[in-house]
Amino acid sequence: MLTAIARQARRAGRAVQAGFDHGRAGLHGHWAVRLAMRHVWSLGTRRLRGIWRARELQGSADIPPGPDRDNLLSMLSSRMGVLVLHEDDGCAVLGIRDIDFPAALSVLRAACPQARFLCAGTEVDPAGSGWLRLLAAPRVDLLQPGSQRIELECYEARPNGVWLSRNRANATARALYQDPFGHPGLTRLAGILPAPTLRQRLRDEPVDLVYTWVNHQDPAWIEAFARHVPRPSAGVGDENDAAALSRFHSSDELRYSLRSVALNLPWARRIHVVTNCAPPDWLDPDHPCIRWIPHERIIQSEYLPTFSSHVIESRLHHIPDLSLRFLYLNDDVFVVTPKEKAFFFGASGNSRAFLEEDGVVSGPVRASDPDHLNAARNSAQLLARDFGFWPTQLHKHAPFALRQDILAEIEARWATDFARFRPSRFRSSDDLNLTSFLYHHYALATGRAEIAPLRLSLVMPMDLRWKNRLRTALEGDVEALCLNEGGAQAPGADWHRSIRRFLEVNFPERAPWERTRIK
């Protein structure tokens, strides 16, 4: 609450300061004031004309509900000029001029009554005051049942025949110096630019998602775990942490994590789930977007069964038909705002590393320390030996942006070191953490990655304030969320109940690969 009040106060302060700045500028430059007034008047009258056009269209046009995307594009382009900025199987990004923007929203609302309208990832009711918010938005996302998506950007007329998109994040064609909107019809950006930009080429490349998943209630998994779990007398500290049941507990997070990526990463080509358990009853493993990958398909038989995430992660790049660039997520990670591929991979194709702000990787391996820290120390030793630097920052518990070719290169370079820890059934002090540490610092050292910011909300049951953190987890400018249960001490039933309620409330939209009826 206090955070929201402070944010509003800062906005009010900036508005007052802007008013003073404009006032001072007006005293010294009357011509600038006149120019600004003409611009405001022009925008206002064009917006009124747009609303009037939308009302006329609602009253006269027969718009059949439920068309597919091609028919929607045909319907829009028969009434107004439409610029296709991008189009793939999951999404179409369209530019619409300001006068036609209200009419375009009206057409889509009438044709897709079941669709959801989103602004900056937040659903907006197109009735009442929500309609005004849609009209003023720099970009509006229309999410149809089945996760088909249309994104609309509003282009405003500026002097000298320039059209400027309200969407400042449009790095491809925010400014247009020719008019694709003068007459009804469809114009593709490829007809304006003589060649694709680097960002466009990246956007056209496939990017897959990879999950590792375990279900502590799976009968076959329970039997295998009971056969191989270390006895309590086998050790203390890190070994107990590595074999703690809390590491394998499932509160159905996978369902909601998949919902979050269906909503916010609609461009993902395929989702590979690496596991040694049967699919959950709500998931359709035969859906064209889903690939169910048993451990034995990518891990050599002599290392199975394994309950070590470090061993499993060291073989992810062997997934058949995996895209060159892919994102790896644990099932306790959720993407909470829409993100483009360029958020995870730079225009040159380099992966982006979302490192922790503080440096905590130092010192020798100690059995009493967390196993992820020991694995980072082992990985840092390899980099110090071969490249002469010691990495100190862990990667945030967020999506990991990875490249298959670099992972294979690392595995080949340090094959002996990988062979040393892979026989361990559980995490051990000899581990390397390839996907969450070694890859990112190796790619940075070889010029194929870049450090990037990511706003992460992390909630853990070992924090005495976890209930308050859970209530406020999605407040502010959060981009990703992690509900991390790991640790030697299992959380209580209250944690699991609270997490389930939180996920049901915040990720209610069923993903296209969920069964409508559970067996």
Image (tube, grey):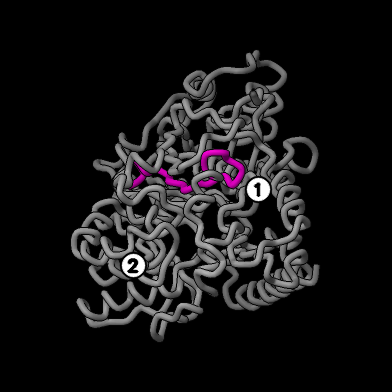
Badge 1 vs badge 2, beta-carbon distance below 8 Å: no
Magenta range? 201-221
Quadrant of residue 204 in the image? Answer: top left
The nearer-to-camera label among 1 and 2 is 1
Residue underneath mark 1: 251
Can residue 206 be found in the magenta stretch?
Answer: yes
Residue 103 drawn in magenta: no
Q: Is residue 391 above or below residue 213?
A: below
Question: Which quadrant of the rendered structure holds the N terminus?
Answer: bottom right
Image spot of residue 439 (x, y percent): 32, 63
Where 437 sits versus 189, above or below?
Answer: below
- Residue at 41% x, 39% y: name it: 294
Residue at left offset 51%, top offset 53%: 330
> Mark 2 Cα within 10 Å, few/some/many (few <14, many 20+)?
many
Q: Quadrant of residue 514?
A: top right
Q: Secondary structure at mark 2?
A: helix
Callout 2 amino acid: Leu
Residue where numbered disc 2 is placed: 438
> Is residue 180 in sight in this rendering?
no
